[in-house]
């Protein structure tokens, strides 16, 4: 009787752990969904305000641009650092990095992840250019500019590429990062994304609203693609994990060099 009672108790505990895991997964999935919805709503709001040339947006954009431009002119070391950060995060640089990542994933027979990388990065670039053409916003015009850029201004291509690029790298390689270092890795990625946006404003080639819009649409795109990837796995009968585990944690050994 004791053995039977023990087995029953163990089964009950296992069921409770499974139910708790499901509730935790559902809660995190709902949180990610809500973040995506809020980010999408905020992007639409910023887009409409920029397109309508709302007075307070224009005033804030020009004030921030002028202040940072004056600082950049007076501090050459700061300007050089901003140029280096900006140049290191050009779209072409991201394309090269992601092509190498996708190639590595193909060599390791991780074809789903390779497709995720290619589609997410190329789709983000295409989306950015489409929105730029639709909004058709001119870049800042400053006296004595410290940098020059072509094309339209909203949203910032560098800022969007940064949030999507670092997000993709984390989603793919998070499984091989020790748990105690994952928070640090995510924090470092977020810091680099913010620095890229700050650099583009400091160099006078984008407005503040350009960068904010880029961060928002990049986040929405990244969440959407990660959700689509998880749906793909579910349809193939693969387990779906929390996002803090990475996209395919079961393949961590193949991800290692």
Image (spheres, rainbow, N blue to C red):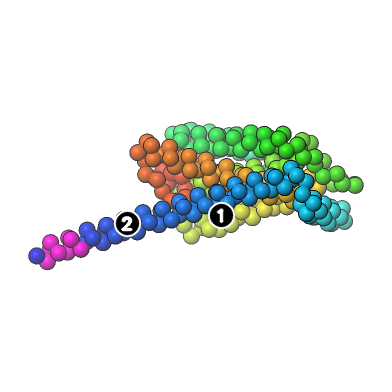
Task: Say which element carries label 2.
Answer: helix
Is 52 in the magenta? no
Decide: few, some or many residues near mark 2? Use Cα within 10 Å; few <14, some 14-19, many ≥20.
few
Residues at marks 2 and 1, CA–CA distance in whole angstroms: 28 Å
Place of residue 257 in the rendered image (x, y in percent of width and height, measured from the top left): 49, 43
| Residue toward you, 44 or 35 | 44
Task: Say which element carries label 1.
Answer: helix
Can you tell which quarter of the image residue 23 is in?
A: bottom left
Residue drawn at point x = 76 percent, y = 52 percent: 57
Residue drawn at point x = 51 percent, y = 56 percent: 182
Decide: few, some or many residues near mark 1? Use Cα within 10 Å; few <14, some 14-19, many ≥20.
some
Q: Residue furthest left?
A: 1
Locate the N terminus and report the quarter of the image it occupies: bottom left
In the image, residue 34 above or below residue 155: below
N-terminal-most mark, 2 or 1: 2
Residue drawn at point x = 78 percent, y = 46 percent: 53
Place of residue 119 in the rendered image (x, y in percent of width and height, measured from the top left): 55, 34
| Residue toward you, 220 or 119 | 220
In this image, 9 relative to 176: left or right?
left
Residue drawn at point x = 61 percent, y = 38 percent: 124
Return the residue at label 2: 19
Q: Which residues are magenta?
A: 2-9
Place of residue 214 in the rendered image (x, y in percent of width and height, measured from the top left): 67, 45
Return the residue at label 1: 186
Report the magenta stretch's main SS.
helix
In this image, 94 relative to 22: left or right?
right
Q: Is residue 78 visible?
A: no
| Residue toward you, 166 or 11 | 11
């Amino acid at each position: 009787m004791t053995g039977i009672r023990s087995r029953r108790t163990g089964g009950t505990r296992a069921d409770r752990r499974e139910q708790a895991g499901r509730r935790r997964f559902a809660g995190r999935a709902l949180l990610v969904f809500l973040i995506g919805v809020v980010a999408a709503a905020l992007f639409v709001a910023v887009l409409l305000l920029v397109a309508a040339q709302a007075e307070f947006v224009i005033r804030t954009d020009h004030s921030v641009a002028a202040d940072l431009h004056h600082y950049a002119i007076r501090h050459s070391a700061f300007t050089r650092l901003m140029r280096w950060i900006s140049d290191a995060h050009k779209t072409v640089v991201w394309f090269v990095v992601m092509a190498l990542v996708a190639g590595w994933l193909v060599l390791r027979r991780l074809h789903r992840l390779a497709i995720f990388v290619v589609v997410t990065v190329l789709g983000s670039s295409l989306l950015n250019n489409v929105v730029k053409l639709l909004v058709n916003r001119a870049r800042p015009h400053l006296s004595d500019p410290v940098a020059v850029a072509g094309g339209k201004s909203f949203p910032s291509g560098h800022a969007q590429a940064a949030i999507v690029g670092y997000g993709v790298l984390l989603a793919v390689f998070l499984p091989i990062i020790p748990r105690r270092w994952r928070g640090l890795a995510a924090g470092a990625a977020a810091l680099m994304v913010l620095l890229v946006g700050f650099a583009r404003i400091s160099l006078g080639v984008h407005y503040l609203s350009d960068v904010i819009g880029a961060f928002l649409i990049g986040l929405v795109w990244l969440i959407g693609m990660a959700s689509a990837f998880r749906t793909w796995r579910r349809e193939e009968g693969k387990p779906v994990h929390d996002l803090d585990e990475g996209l395919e944690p079961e393949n961590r050994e193949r991800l290692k060099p």
